Image (spheres, rainbow, N blue to C red):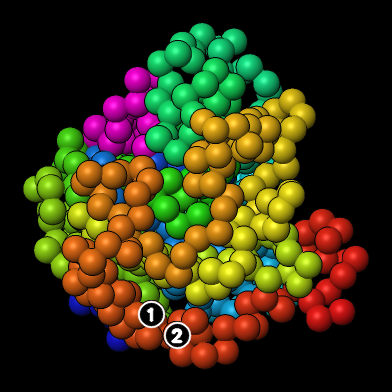
Amino acid sequence: MMRSLPQAVFLLLALMGCVHAQERPNILFCIADDWGWPHASAYGDPVLKTPTFDRIAREGVLFQHAYVSSPSCTPSRNAILTGQYHWRLDEGANLWSSLSTRFPVYPLLLEARGYHVGHWRKSWGPGRVKVGGYTDSHPAGKPYKKGFEQFLAARPDKKPFCFWLGAHDPHRGYALGSGRKSGMDIDQVKVPAFYPNVEQVRSDIADYYFEVQRFDSDVARALAMLEARGELENTIVVMTGDHGMPFPRCKSNIYDMGVRVPLAIRWGARVKGGRTVTDFVSLVDLAPTFLELAGVEVPADVNGRSLLPILNASASGRVEAGRDHVIYGKERHVPCRPDHSGYPCRGIRTDGWAYIKNFKPDRWPVGDPPRYGDTDPAGGPGKKITKTYLLDHKDDPAGKRFFDLSFAKRPAEELYDMKADPDQISNLAADPRHAAVKAALAARLEGQLRATGDPRVLGGADRFDSYPYYGGSAWRKKKPGK
């Protein structure tokens, strides 16, 4: 059943020729690789400059509470494409996996209804696309190696388009010192409270900033192409990242610095600009949003909810009262244990609290020592400079606390007061004063996991640890159980 009768009527009229198909909006989806919140000047960062993101936010809607399904590339992108939480996607819940054609993806649904569809650089993955049944097609449509300009040139006359503008920025490795060399004052870089505020860490974050700014420039060029063609106002532009920055306790973790991302959406005169909303949204909401605005049927198994009510509103702040929380989780990122098991966890975030359930607290959260391989390799120019510093100082009296926050084992439950402790340093799960809050959040999370068919609460979750990992040599050398 269609979720919006007016959109259904619109599509019917378009197919009958009563309205022109090009009146359906174009869709430009711009996503960075490892770009997390709050790293944009629109969010108040004193060093990072993101004029394109800021423009989209200024002329559209800036989201304060946008989250991914998983802080890992493949499952995050699978969730975006399908509009379903990653734990519903079988092996698609893991990094370097596949995505079965059993799960409909919004670009191909749009293509079947007359959209010109394509992508540039990183879209779905990483993984093996053909394993899931994709042969002549790709989950994000045809690749255009020369980018957005080539895609537009290949577009049939008058067809609306849907383009995935991907990037490899700001994924590691970095050109060592690139942030400082670009003119950034690294002494002004804001360092999260779970890191020591030292020059090596500030410089590493600045190098990450440098690549964020490079992605911002890519999007600027795309907007300029649309303006030159007179098509920007009929294009909904979305700019975001697939999860948090590639640093310890961020990427591959379900703290805010791992699962919270920048998000701004612009749609010409159709969306009132200059608004900042505090509604909790998930990137699984994008697929039903794109389908609804194009008048295409939303599959019944989609978990996300269209953002059009927020975009069509005129208010800032909390627009939809029911959007007062969000859920997320993680399965295996990389095979960093002898049995190739992951670190399964789920979380729920509200205005005041973050609750995390760690299903296997006996495991090391980011891989077994001494490598802690679920955080990128340490050492070497442009590699894991912050990780290297934490490992080198783990035995220092002042350094052990920071090391433990990123690498030590964690309890089965975590609870954080997000008003008093936004960097999630002090776990209050064992504090009896907060027992009622913890119990309520745990029950709410479990209820939603059951409602969305999560094997971690319904049973059968062991399969997440045995699915193939198609990246690198670790899987080829030894498979689980052998």
Q: Measured along the vertical axis of the image, is residue 94 above or below residue 370?
A: below
Which residue corresponds to mark 2? Answer: 457
Bounds of the magenta segment: 38-59
Q: In which quarter of the image is the N terminus?
A: bottom left
Q: Quadrant of residue 9?
A: bottom left
Are there few (<14), some (14-19), or many (20+) residues within 10 Å of tag 2?
Answer: few
Is 186 in front, or is 7? Answer: 186
Measuring 25% from the left and 52% from the top, which residue is drawn there?
A: 417
Q: Quadrant of residue 441?
A: bottom left
Q: Quadrant of the C terminus?
A: bottom right
Is 461 in front, or is 228? Answer: 461
CB contact under 8 Å: marks 2 and 1? yes
Which residue corresponds to mark 1? Answer: 449
Q: Is residue 423 magenta?
A: no
Between discs 2 and 1, the one toward the N terminus: 1
Q: Measured along the vertical axis of the image, is residue 314 above or below residue 466?
A: above
Q: In this view of the protein, can residue 269 be seen by the observer?
A: no
